[in-house]
Amino acid sequence: MTNPFKDWDATKVTEHNQRVANRKAVSKTVASAADLVDGKRVRQSQKQPTKLHRDWGLVLKSLHSEGVHEEAITLKLCNGVRYCPDWVITTCTESYCLTAYEVKGFMRDDARKSLLFAAKEYPWIRFVLVWREKGEWRQQEILL
């Protein structure tokens, strides 16, 4: 696969982040109005992030003023398997434009395999595994 973001510069990333932020604001407004019809809930409630995910999101947002998105992309792996990183940051460097963070308190074997396969299939995305150990955040970049 080729890198679809190879021609992106900082201006294009900023414009993209603003479009995504506007889209989310509009969809949240529409969804909240459609929550109740005749006193009944129309759609299922969304999953809430765990405390670990929420805390890491606060760390990312304090480090990056923009371009931090929660579960913003879904990657097709193989045989109908999809992988959705917990957090994605859209900042371009020389070697990549996206950084995908996977936050885990405990990693099961299938989650590890999906993360490794995604890192292999999408080399233009930097994948980082994040966990908290004794109150400190630990990070491990997935290298292949």
Image (cartoon, helix red, strand yellow):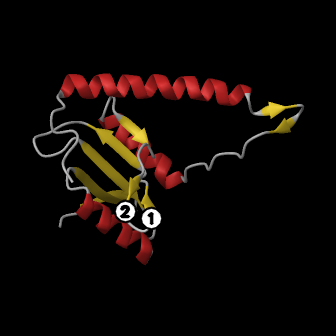
Front one among 83 and 106: 83
Which quarter of the image is occupied by the C terminus?
bottom left
**In the image, is residue 10 above or below residue 129?**
above
Q: Is residue 84 left or right of residue 46?
A: left
Which residue lies at the image location 72% right of the left edge and 25% below the top edge? Answer: 33
Judged from this view, the residue extending furthest toward the left is 94
What's under tag 2, amino acid-wise? Answer: Leu
Instruction: Give percent across and percent down for residue 119.
Output: 26, 61
Q: Is residue 132 left or right of residue 29?
A: left
Q: Which residue is mark 2?
A: 77
Residues under labels 1 and 2: Cα distance?
A: 5 Å
Instruction: Give percent across and percent down for residue 127.
Output: 27, 56
Residue 116 makes an appearance in the image: yes
**In the image, is residue 73 above or below residue 142?**
above
Asked if disc 1 and disc 2 are in contact, CB closer than 8 Å, the reply is yes
Q: Is residue 40 left or right of residue 67?
A: right
Front one among 9 and 66: 9
What's under tag 1, amino acid-wise? Answer: Val
